Amino acid sequence: MALLDIRNLDLNIYGVPVLRGVSLSIAAGETLGLVGESGSGKSMTALATMQLLPRGASARGSIRLDGEELIGRDERAMCALRGRDISMVFQEPMTALNPLKTVGAQVSEVFRLHLGAPRAECDAWASQVLERVGLPPARYAPDRYPHELSGGQRQRVVIAMAVALKPKLLIADEPTTALDVTTQAQILTLMRALVAEDGASLLLITHDLAVVAETADRVAVMRRGEVVEEGETAAFFGGMTHPYSRALLEASTHVPQRRPRVAPGTVPGTAPAAREGGPILVADGVVREYRGRRAGWFRPAGCHRAVDAVTLSVAPGESVGLVGESGCGKSTLARTLLALEAPQGGRILFRGRDVSSLDAAGIARLRRDVQVVFQDPYGSFDPRHKAGRLVAEPLHLLRGEIDAAERDRRIARVLSDVGLRPEDAEKYPHEFSGGQRQRLAIARALITRPALIVLDEPVSALDVSIRAQVLDLLAELQARHALAYLFISHDLAVVRAITDRVLVMRAGIIVEQGPTAAVLDAPQHDYTRTLVAASPDLARALAERRTRAMPAANGRSADAAVPSA
Amino acid sequence: MTHPADIAPRVPRPFVARALAHPSFLLGGAIALVVAAMALLSFVWTPHEAGAIEIARKLRPPSTEHWFGTDQFGRDVLSMIMRGAVTSMAVSFVAVGIGVGLGVPLGLLAAARRGVLGEAVMRANDFVFAFPALIIAIMLRDVFGPGAVNAMVAIGIFNVPVFARLAYGAALPLWTREFVMAARVAGKGGALITLEHILPNMLNLLIVQATVQLSLGILAEAALSYVGLGVQPPQPSWGRMLNEAQTLMALAPRLALIPGTAIVLTVLGLNLLGDGLRDLLDPRLARER
Amino acid sequence: MLAYVGRRLLSLAVTLAIASAIVFTVMEILPGDPAEVMLGTNARPDTLAALRAQYGLDRPAPERYLAWAGGLLQGDMGLSYTYSVPVTQLVAERMWVSLPLALIALTLTTLIAIPVGALAAAKRNSATDVGVMTATQVGIAVPNFWFAMLLVLVFAITLRWLPAGGFPGWKAGAWPALKALVLPAVALALPQASILARVMRSSLLDTLGEDYVRTARAKGLTRAQTVRRHALRNALIPVLTIMGLQFSFLLAGTIIIENVFFLPGLGRLVFQAITQRDLIVVKSVVMLLVASVVVVNFLVEVGYAAVDPRLRRRV
């Protein structure tokens, strides 16, 4: 009998259908990977199982845990169940803990609540659990407050609370999405180990197929509130039947068609940048420091060197990747290169001239030639302006040079360049989808006909299928306009797909650089190696799964392949 | 991660349609309109000459000739209320004007410049908070002499840090937004970005706060006039009417009830209007209710 | 934590120094000569000069400021022009009315606002909630001095339960003195409590939407337990801030309310001093009021740090 059995679950929130006929089951000790893009209903399925639905939600159908119906169950009985039999780990570790209580107390609370034991005893148990999740009390005192811990450590605390009473079912809703890749790998390893030790079942919700391939026994794919396909992991990746699953897989492993790099000066009639030769932008030993401010709750005061003696250059038509984890200084470096912030040390050269010596006209020239696309497709537009005005904003740099007719022509041209229609100029940003907005951002960067575009995590906020389309667009535009890219990302797969050369950055320092394929296939620096090993990689995960399954013989796979009734 | 806008692009109903369906906006707006109309009307017509003393008809109860009766000097209460509305509105409008006119530019400047200048501006503002309007009025009494100007300046000075803080607090996160970065990459300077992106995006917030400060200004004007630091006779004021009514509480409580109700209704109306505007102008601003 | 309090204390001292300079300067540029007021406009010039010398009015402004500020530090506010007694003594007497009044009002405000606000938030959209929101909306709109007059009309004039004004002094016994303060305190507290209750309600609602509240529910806490153990303390942080800001309104309110009830407090003192042009009294009382606002906000900030571990390490 399945441990968790969801049948024909329908869910409406204020009358809007969110889930339609969802059926899933998880056997004891099994891990089910629940995959889907944003808004597919994954999280709502989890919250329905916890019976922690938002206001205005009404569920019909059946959710059984160990044969007992959860829907409509008395709230007090549900409270006794939560944290003891089913528990949950959420996506955002930074906000998941009460900022005013020590982590020890928050873990201890689970014991006090469910076992009613004396405080001292519960505290001792809490220390044991914290040790189990890799926070030994000797090194990480349980009387610390959440703000004194990093994101990964906080997620460990949340996991400690979830596994404290060895629940039968653990639900993890995108538990590593907010974390860096190296931390993500550690957290996933930890969760796999805990679940295996306790013999618990795991419902792992994620948008990342590679994570599922590494972790799950079975996979279910959700789309628009429905489960479209489900199966044992190896079989699922071997032969997907539903077109959406296939599209998802294609998009996850998508590599855009790129033409070979244009050598400077060899292509006639392209952008002036390509003809001038010499690097467009050079950073020469750039240092950027921040004085200790009270901006962060957990950042110690004092001087923080965000960018430390970084040297790099971008030549016309070239695509350079800059890889690193959050907080490594890559966005600060980008702002410094864009001359939005002045470096405290070193120089930035724009076409051979020191940026600090440029006059207003020189800066304007720099801004025309070096444009930018940001990560967040929702934050990069002033919500009060129409698309046409937003896209045309950089034409401020060409004021006096072009007239209104030329302005309109350029708006129409860049909009069609990025796959939008010229009529879209009359729309407001909120009328576009996330992917369309990112196209709009690219159009804005193109309108001054720059030689270099700095792309700061341009696809990180997008779902995989849209990410693939935007990457295709970037590759096509680069070929057509002989653009140079400085592509900043934490995602190795994306960098591999779109760059010629890559720089790996850690704590403000470039630790390794070289041709993209060479660096990622045969990393020399320890950190690059860790990064490559930690990055979820679908092909590698599937290969490992096959080798793992081999010696285990048929006994184990039979265990895993519980009929998906 | 989940952006509901991805599933269904948000299509807001037109402002007017939502406004007409918003009870507190409608009620508050109606009250504010009535008070404003009453004040405007008093410039051309009042039932009797406002403030004209005629001891012979003192303390008359309400009648068809004197709807709200007369006070101990025989003045027509309704006429005084109408002219009092002018005082209330004028003082608190000018005070909000002073607050917006000085506070918003200061806050915007502090946010645009950050650094030492920003810090200095905001510290100075924190500082003014230590001086309640009443204390400013006491200190400035002899500079301007007791009267409407003194009340306007005192309440206005108190409003400056309110608007400076609001503008600063709203501008700071806007400055880190990517669309402002994009504007900087488009070669626009601090002043232009402030005008094009920062100020328009906080306009709603300012409008809502202005209604709140307007209602606080009316309360403050009444209090100052009540203790004799505000409007002086013969100019009618609700606050002073209350002061004059105090000794007659047992005899003619109506003289205290009528101006007090006028104050309560006006302030209530403005507050409801402010709440309504908050909901209507920006649904994200509205606290869950 | 100690270092934090130390830094705050330093900035408190700087703030007070600047405040005293502003108060002194503003009062200094005021027109009007206290000596003339005391002796009348047709006093002889040499009498005027002698009086100015007696009160130190003939010395240059910076010197007088230093003398005044130095005196303040030692608890010496100088001599009142009209009463010819030390201002410190005048203020101390009056303080025994104003301070208890403000404290009772503050206590009442808190005791009413926090439970009412929390109840409204916990029962969001219920009849209770709607009732609380309507009542507080009206409460905010009521001027406290008018409310005081209504209270007098009902409880003193009509029902005759409590005195309509005046203060018997603490020597007459605690009960009669407290009785005299009940109506003023209620008049001060209710409008303030309306504001604070609304702040409490929205703050608790915000907190209940936080991720850690969901985490707590996932642990198996009931709704009520979650509110008690996790949400309330977090929700109180913004409430504390507003309470600090409200203190200056409360103080201003006290001065006005004292006039309604003829209470011999600081408010009466300052208004009498204004009409009598007793500038030294006005200056000292204004400084005292400003200082108490500054000190209360300092206490709020320290309290803030005591509640919130995140602030203890901030600069």
Image (cartoon, rainbow, N blue to C red):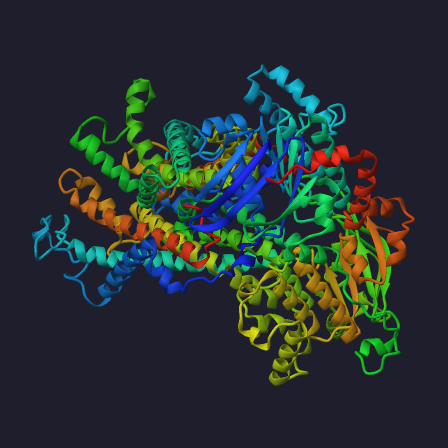
**Where does residue C263 sit, x and y in percent of width and height?**
31, 32
Q: Quadrant of residue A363?
A: bottom right
**Residue sitting nearer the eye, A112 or A350:** A112
* Residue at 9% over, 48% down: B61
The residue nearer to you, when weighing A476 against C188, is A476
Residues C72 and B122: in front is: B122
State the image quarter where residue A465 is shown: bottom right
Residue C73 in sight here: no
Q: Is residue A294 above or below residue A163?
A: below
Residue drawn 14% across and 52% down?
Answer: B68
Give how far across and how far down residue A452 sits, in percent.
78, 69
State the quadrant of the C terminus of chain A: top right
Tag count in the figure?
0
Residue in the image at 42% along x and 54% along y = B278
Please state if A314 lies on the left or on the right of A43 as rendered.
right
Residue C122 appears in the picture as rendered? yes
- Measured as percent of width and height from the top left, residue B93 is found at 37, 59
Asked if residue B281 lies left or right of residue A372, the reply is left
Residue A508: image x %, image y %?
A: 81, 50
Q: Quick check: A242 left or right of C134?
A: right
Check the picture and name the quadrant holding the N terminus of chain A: top right
**Residue, x 14% and y 61% (percent of image)?**
B48
Residue nearest the viewer, comparing B252 with C142: C142
Looking at the image, residue C199 lies above or below residue A283: above
